[in-house]
Image (tube, grey):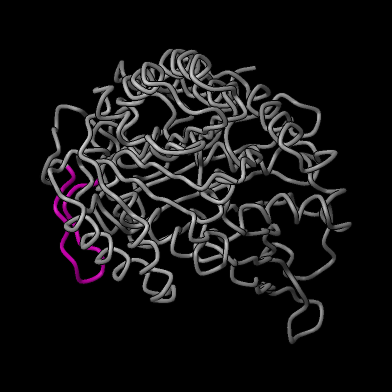
Amino acid sequence: MIHRLAVFGATGDLSARYLLPALAALRAAGHLGDRFQLTCAGREDWDGERFRHWVAGRLDRHGASWPADARKAIVACTRYRRADVTDPAEVASVIAGDGPVAVYLALPPAVFPAAVTTLHDVGLPPGSRIVLEKPFGEDLDGAVELNRLLADLVPEQAVFRVDHFLAMTTVQNVLGSRVANRVLAPIWNSIHIAEVEIVWDESLALEGRAGYYDGVGALKDMVQNHLLQLLCLVAMEPPISLDERELRDRKVDVLRSVRPLTEKDAVRRTRRARYKAGRIGDRPVPAYTDEEGVDPGHHTETFAEVELELDSPRWSGTVFRLRSGKALGHDRKEVAVRFRPVPHLPFGNSGDARPDVLRFGLEPEGLTMDLMGIGSRAQTLVPLTLTARMDPPGLPAYGQVLLDVLRGDAALSVRGDEAEESWRVLTPVLSAWSKDLVPLQEYPAGSDGPVPPRRDAPCSA
């Protein structure tokens, strides 16, 4: 296990909200001992005392659920260095120390190539690892080039392209539920499943993240990584084991089976939109283009939807719909598996029957089944909902991510070819959107999003 972690971009929102509290969680659970060292690098001209005060404040705010002594231990083991990731001397001062180091690039994706190049020039101690946040690259060509740079720096087994969704308990339960249950395993195919919706709709608006979000948008921020990863877990063939190679191979198989979208498909099967002024509850929300730091000329979407089909024996005929939006009227974060209707119903009100839906709640976590049952009057159907409680996770998702990095377990990270395949799936969409072939719609903040089109045209074969 590695006992040194160096975080570049440590004064950003990712560190404040997720990485620092995750480290406190690891300390509280006994995974980090007194040998652990945290070196943080940023562009702010701060001294160590000021930075530790900042860390303590962020832990009190975002990690208050963890014991005070664990938070204090993280503050105590932290040192700060002002560093430009393109300056070899400054980068060398950050990673200096005894033994291997895990280098976490909590940076915008546009900076990854320069940072990796500098690390190559400086050199990493043997056994070191490098961690990159999503999105991995900015397009397919960028991902291929970044993979080449990383291959010159460390072995593929030492590269952690993290997607914290994969460390969420419910996300892992998607795979567990479908392969470990006799009831679900035989019907997990297109014969029984008509459609799968993978949705991450949130009522949060931009929340001061224009510096990152306005150059990325909903498609790259959510669909290209998080939601495609969920697609892989839903659609992958049952793995022989849960080891690193087996899981990653099966995920790549899914991405390679996605039917390529033509330009016409991209027009018919994708949507993009951005929010205009509205209200979310009692809170007024300005239009996206009026948010501080937004350049209206970027035409950045805050809502993205893509409809995909898989060319595989298991899934031919099932529709997979991936959707994410900001500033919507309510949160909806789930994987909804919609089953086909039964062939015959002998009940008097059979016309009121609804197909069964299995829902994996992502946030909050949970499992529900919407189905039909007998009502209080004989021979009548009524909707029923079955709910399963889930034990709370022992670690937050980022806690599991960091623990895997320090231990060297890459099973839940994204392999290089997998990152490239994810971009390949969406390259036709990016191309069509860049040509304005798909209109940029608008929807009021606090609404259900843009009005959906008719769904009556299949994807091209």
Q: Is residue 430 left or right of residue 256?
A: left
What's drawn in magenta, residue-wise? Answer: 275-288
Q: Is residue 105 left or right of residue 399?
A: left
- Residue name at image x 16 percent, y 57 percent: 50
Decide if residue 376 is in sight here. yes
Q: Is residue 283 above or below residue 195?
A: below
Q: Quadrant of residue 30?
A: bottom right
Residue 367 shown in magenta: no
Q: How many marks?
A: 0
- Residue name at image x 76 percent, y 26 percent: 312
x and y, in percent, of residue 269 in the image: 49, 29
x and y, in percent, of residue 247 in the image: 72, 36
Residue 178 versus residue 159: which sits nearer the camera? 159
- Residue name at image x 33 percent, y 61 percent: 329
Q: Is residue 209 above or below residue 18?
A: above
Which quadrant holds the C terminus?
A: top right
Residue 286 shown in magenta: yes
Decide if residue 197 is in sight here. no
x and y, in percent, of residue 438 in the image: 35, 25
Q: Is residue 123 left or right of residue 420?
A: left
x and y, in percent, of residue 181 in the image: 84, 57
Residue 411 versus residue 404: which sits nearer the camera? 404
Q: Is residue 206 above or below residue 139?
A: below
Q: Is residue 199 above or below residue 134?
A: below
Q: Is residue 405 left or right of residue 149?
A: right
Residue 40 versus residue 125: which sits nearer the camera? 125
| Residue at the extreme bottom | 376
- Residue name at image x 51 percent, y 42 percent: 163
Q: Quadrant of residue 183?
A: bottom right
